Image (cartoon, helix red, strand yellow):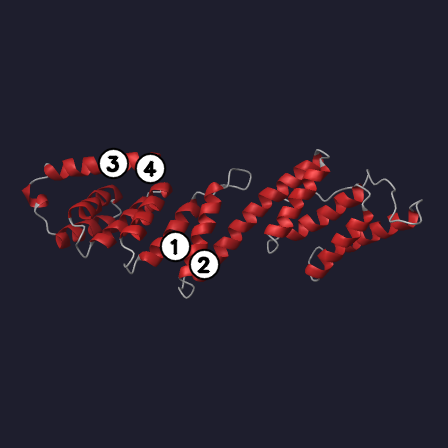
Amino acid sequence: MVKIFLPLVLLVAAVLAAGCGSGEQTATLTADERFERAKALFDKEDYLEAINEFTIITLQFQGSQHAADAQFYLGDCRFKRGEYLLSAFEYGVMKRSYPASARVPEAQFKLAMSYYSISPRSSLDQQYTRKAIDEFQSFVEYYPSNPLAADAEARIKELDGKLAKKLYDAARQYVILERYTAALRYFDDVIDQYHDTDWAPLAFLDKVEVLIRRKKLSDAQTNLSRFLSRYPNSVLRGRADGLQERISNEVKNSPQKTGMGTASLEGAPLLTRVE
């Protein structure tokens, strides 16, 4: 936040200085005239100059009817310039400073979109992905009948998938390293936290594979049954049937007739990693 705030302070100082030396004609503009000028600059995609004008409105005409719109357009200017952290800041200011404005729902959605726009690929740190999810969820919670609510829900699902993939990839890496306890924990996180993503069924079956490899056939059967119950029409049903056959064969060929079997499965292949 400090990194965001300092440039804004410098910008405000520059705007004030420019206003003092911009000539009598510009200095005497009314709030209506100033907003009209700022909006014209925005429409011409001259976002830097528009930022100057909208900032003057928010400072000099805080009580005017244009103040909330000016603050909103500051966010839009930053967003159009790809300055997504700054746009998130400006939309946040708009929400807090003008809670009665009709633009607040759109500001909330665009605040979420600002974080969404800097959400990185799944292998990197996901702090902005989580921020985007939080803001989209707030939007859906407060404005469920808004036309953008469906879009927000779709983006939440997309971002959840990215978080699920990050966990799934970590689990697969632990499998490669033969650190099975850690792998199982991460597979469980995918299954429990992101059960409605495409990565949960994969995590289920990979978990069964690991349990078979660790000779925990009873646990493998239990988890396979859970998979079949939860995803009866899964496109992975063929693989699940193959795992069921493997478990049955291991039990049948086990030298221990009283349990689920302990035959080694170290040579059994695991599912190729999905990119």
Query: How far separated are the C-alphas under marks 2 and 4?
Result: 28 Å
Categorize mark 1 by other alpha carbons within 10 Å: few (<14), some (14-19), many (20+).
Answer: many
The picture places residue 117, in percent across and down from the top left corner, at 43, 46
Q: Tell me which label, 2 or 1, sits earlier in the chain.
A: 1
Figure check: 240 above or below 184: below
Query: How far separated are the C-alphas under marks 3 and 4?
Result: 9 Å
| In this rendering, position of residue 202 left or right of residue 64 | right
Label 4 sits on residue: 4
Residue at 27% across, 51% down: 97
Figure check: 226 above or below 9: below
Q: Is residue 104 visible?
A: yes
Query: How far separated are the C-alphas under marks 2 and 3?
Result: 34 Å
Q: Which amino acid, by three-letter code, is at mark 1?
A: Phe
Q: Tell me which label, 3 or 4, sits earlier in the chain.
A: 4
Res. 228 mark: none
| In this rendering, position of residue 262 left or right of residue 147 | right
Q: Is residue 237 visible?
A: no
Asked whether the beta carbons under mark 2 and mark 1 sit within 8 Å of each other, the answer is: yes
Which numbered mark, 3 or 1, is in the foreground of this view?
Answer: 3
Res. 9 mark: 3
Q: Which amino acid, by three-letter code, is at mark 2?
A: Asp
The image quarter in which residue 136 lies: bottom left
Asked whether the beta carbons under mark 3 and mark 1 sit within 8 Å of each other, the answer is: no
The picture places residue 17, in percent across and down from the top left corner, at 15, 35
Say what secondary structure mark 3 lies in. helix
Q: Tell me which label, 2 or 4, sits earlier in the chain.
A: 4
Categorize mark 2 by other alpha carbons within 10 Å: few (<14), some (14-19), many (20+).
Answer: some
Say what secondary structure mark 2 lies in. helix
Say what secondary structure mark 4 lies in. helix
Label 2 sits on residue: 151
